[in-house]
Amino acid sequence: MSTPVDNIAAPPPALLEHRSYVAYWCARTTTNGAYQMQAVAVGWQIYELTGSAFDLGLVGLIQFFPVVVLGLLIGHIADRYDRRVVVGTCQVIKALAAAAFALGTLAGFLNRDVMLAILFVSGTARAFETPTMHTLVPGIVPPELLQRAIAASSTASQTAIICGPAIGGLLYVFGASTVYLTCTAVFVLASVLVSFIQMQRTPPDKKPVTVKAVFAGFRYIRHNPVVLGAISLDLFAVLLGGVTALLPIYAKDVLEAGPWGLGLLRSAPAVGALAISIWLAHHQIERRVGHVLFIAVAAFGAAAVAFAFSTSPWFPSWRSRSMAPAMP
């Protein structure tokens, strides 16, 4: 006969007891951090080479282009092939791209066109990696831990976005090749960590690719005005209000802060996002969600305008050192 104690359900195991999830979390944190480190080095180096704001815009465009063009293909690749293999292959490609950056820097043949070509390869791998990495989580942990696993995974991304640029800016003091070689090693480490992931649940049977399946997502968005409106609002806000690609100009010419300052500038938005995420975890928005969304977008635009006109020396130590008179 069972006792009341026997009828009490056992608490779910901790996330740290799932080795596959630990490997996943570490792989996601390291690869995202390395990609942010590389972004700082590429932005600073290409601006030093060309001094062109247009070229910095091309850096952002060349990474955004694969996501738009290959968006439909990426989803079907993730559904029809082993997602661990897809993610691991992307890590190897990004490692080779980072190694090419390092080799080009050391050999002296790196110019704008070569950098954009390498960045296109790395950006394409990143386009396949990011959504596929997200879909791994439900197959790694049991359903009762899925919500916690997703939250911890989001924390991994924010941690990488905060720490990666700052570390990249610091390493750039020792040269761009140091950043790229470090990224190469980290991408290789991430590919090894991905190989340790074991899936607890197999994905559903693979269905043949049809035109209906390809455009199913578009039909869903079209028939859900709330989803369409939210996606459109976010798209135009980020597309027209993002200034991340131009941060090297601001760090070098306005603040005179150096690559370390650029790293801190790229980390700042993630710090704000992490702070709001922590607040939302304890204060759920239940009323007037649409109004909150519009206010948030308006605040984002106001912050972008204020940033554009700001000349405040956020990094006074670098600025004072760069402006100090030369010793005779």
Image (spheres, grey):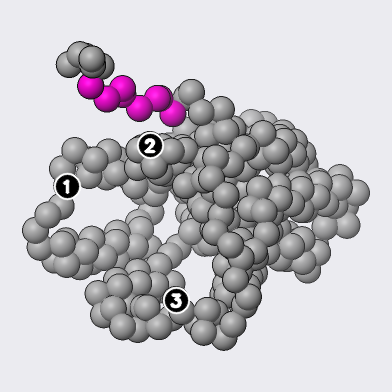
Quadrant hosting residue 146: top left
| Residue lying at 82% horizontally and 57% vertically, measured from the top left | 110
Q: Residues within 10 Å of mark 2 (few under 14, many from 20)?
A: some
Q: Which mark is residue 256?
A: none
Mark 1 or 3, closer to the camera: 3
Quadrant hosting residue 69: bottom right
Q: Position of residue 250 (x, y in %)?
A: 49, 56
Closer-to-camera residue (9/286): 9
The residue indicated by pointer 3 is 217
The image shows residue 246, relative to residue 268, as above or below, that is below
Quadrant hosting residue 290: bottom left
Earlier in the chain: of badge 1 and badge 2, it is 2
- The residue stretch that appears in magenta: 7-15
The overriding secondary structure of the stretch rendered in magenta is: loop
Q: Amino acid at mark 1?
A: Gln
| Residue lying at 51% horizontally and 84% vertically, measured from the top left | 212
The residue indicated by pointer 2 is 145
User: Would residue 6 be found to the left or right of residue 258 on screen?
Assistant: left
The residue indicated by pointer 1 is 284
Element marked by disc 2: helix
Q: Position of residue 88 (x, y in %)?
A: 70, 47
